[in-house]
Amino acid sequence: MTTASGSTTLEWPEVARRLQAERTVWLGTVGVDGAPHAAPVWLAVLDDEAFIFMSAATVKARNLRVNDQAVVHCADGEDVLIVSGRCEFVGHPRELPEVLDVFARKYQQPGDSDFLPEQDATADCLFRLTPTRALAWQLEEFEGSQRRWSTT
């Protein structure tokens, strides 16, 4: 949706809030052979930085270790948010307890804790998404609702 002044800008704090509000987002990566790969992931935002945990054995983790370019988007095709950037490996999730706390506060549905790094031993990689651009729009008002954010 456009702002009252008709601006088409999108600010990073708004993007970060939207990502934090989403239960699951889709992560797109690129394999060494150039093939795209998409997978649903849990994401948490701490101090306007987005984090994603996963198992080192997964295709997405292997892809990110070779090519850190990634795209994250919300599942809703009617209220779209697409964020492009780089996913940097920052270590084992337990090395950043403040990030684990954000995940624990966000994912509190029954059974969620079984999949968080504190309980799931396979969740051994933590990546920080450094965004470079974002795009948002609402399908019902496509032309008038497009907004963009970029680091350049």
Image (cartoon, rainbow, N blue to C red):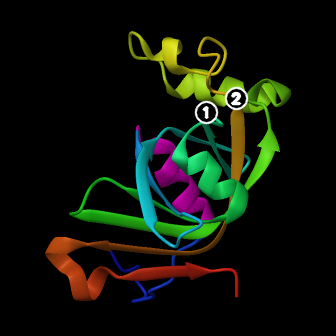
Circle 1 packing at 10 Å, graded few (<14), some (14-19), many (20+), is: some
Instruction: Give x and y (percent) for residue 118.
Output: 67, 15
Asked whether residue 70 is in view, the answer is yes
Q: What span is in magenta?
A: 12-23
Instruction: Tell me which residue sits at (70%, 61%) in the image.
Output: 66
Q: Is label 2 in a helix, a strand or a loop? A: loop
Amino acid carrying label 2: it is Asp
> Which residue in the structure is indicated by mark 2?
124
Q: Quadrant of the N terminus?
A: bottom left
What is the count of numbered marks?
Answer: 2
Instruction: Tell me which residue sits at (57%, 21%) in the image.
Output: 116
Residue 16 lies in magenta, yes or no? yes
Asked whether residue 87 is in view, the answer is no
Cα separation between marks 2 and 1 = 5 Å
Q: Is label 1 in a helix, a strand or a loop? A: loop
Q: Earlier in the sequence, mark 2 or mark 1?
A: 1
- Whether pointer 2 and pointer 1 mark residues with C-beta atoms closer than 8 Å, the reply is yes
Q: Choose top left, top right, bottom left or bottom right for residue 85.
A: bottom right
Q: Quadrant of the C terminus?
A: bottom right
The answer to whether 81 appears left or right of 103 in the picture is left
> Which residue in the structure is indicated by mark 1?
55
The answer to whether 85 appears left or right of 39 in the picture is right
Amino acid carrying label 1: it is Ser
Q: With respect to residue 2, does 115 lie above or below? A: above
Residue 142 lies in magenta, yes or no? no
Q: With respect to residue 1, does 76 lie above or below? A: above
